[in-house]
Image (tube, rainbow, N blue to C red):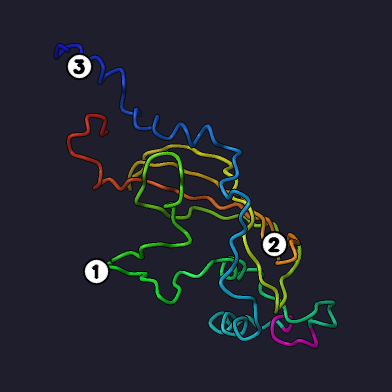
Amino acid sequence: MSAQASTKNKAAAGPDDWKAEWQPVVDAVGRDFSDGETVWGADAVERGAIRRYLEPLEFDCALHTDPQVARRAGFADVTMPYTGLMSWTLPPMWRPGETLFDSDDRDAQPVRSAINNQDMPIGPKTTGFFGTDIEVDFLRPVVAGERIGRRGRRLVSCVPKETSVGRGAFMTWESEIVTTFGEVVARIRIGTYAYVPKNDVPDNDDRKG
């Protein structure tokens, strides 16, 4: 291929050619990536954990601390603060016999996390990830003694975009928060940005803007 043809091909690709790697993800909008699995929180909601959750907030509400008050309000036990929903739906980071940190380097990251993008089966491999926004519809309070989990992981949107931190895509995911009896207590939408950090883009990338 002549130098002129090579230059023409690069020009045809354009500065946004990297976005083509995200097309399979864009095409998958509407798909549930959970394969029917419900991811359960590490522990059931219990009074002691609610108390510890309230302490730094100094959130004084008898529904969360006094079982009698909660029962008079129609609940079986004290209620979990709505803002604790995410805390009680996260699976355990570590289990006995596992290694969570395999490096003692400064700023070393865990080998796995419940809030990363490592299990994405399609699209480009990304090493950077953070949440951008969250929206929750609460249907009823969760009470002490219940265990909750996240059911479903439906991709609602995917928008590839280059930002100041790297190249990636903004995605929105939708799930239901359920009890062990299958009752839906909340619906949640989480926005994320999965990306390849700028420093990881090769210097010889002709498409780099």
Q: Secondary structure at mark 3?
A: helix
Q: Residue at x 64, y 77 (%)?
A: 45
Q: Residue at x 20, y 16 (%)?
A: 6
| Dot in front, 1 or 2 | 2
First in sequence: mark 2 vs mark 3: 3
Say whether marks 2 and 3 touch (CB < 8 Å): no
Say what amino acid the circle numbered 1 marks. Answer: Arg
Near-viewer residue (153 or 142)? 153
Return the x and y of residue 190 as percentages of the image width and height: 56, 53
Residue 130, above or below 9: below
Mark 3 surroundings within 10 Å by alpha-carbon count, few (fewer than 14), some (14 through 19), many (20 or more): few
Residue holding disc 2 = 178
| Mark 2 to mark 3 CA distance (whole Å) | 55 Å
Left or right of 166? Residue 199 is left
Which numbered tag is attached to residue 106? 1
Residue stretch rendered in magenta on the structure: 62-69
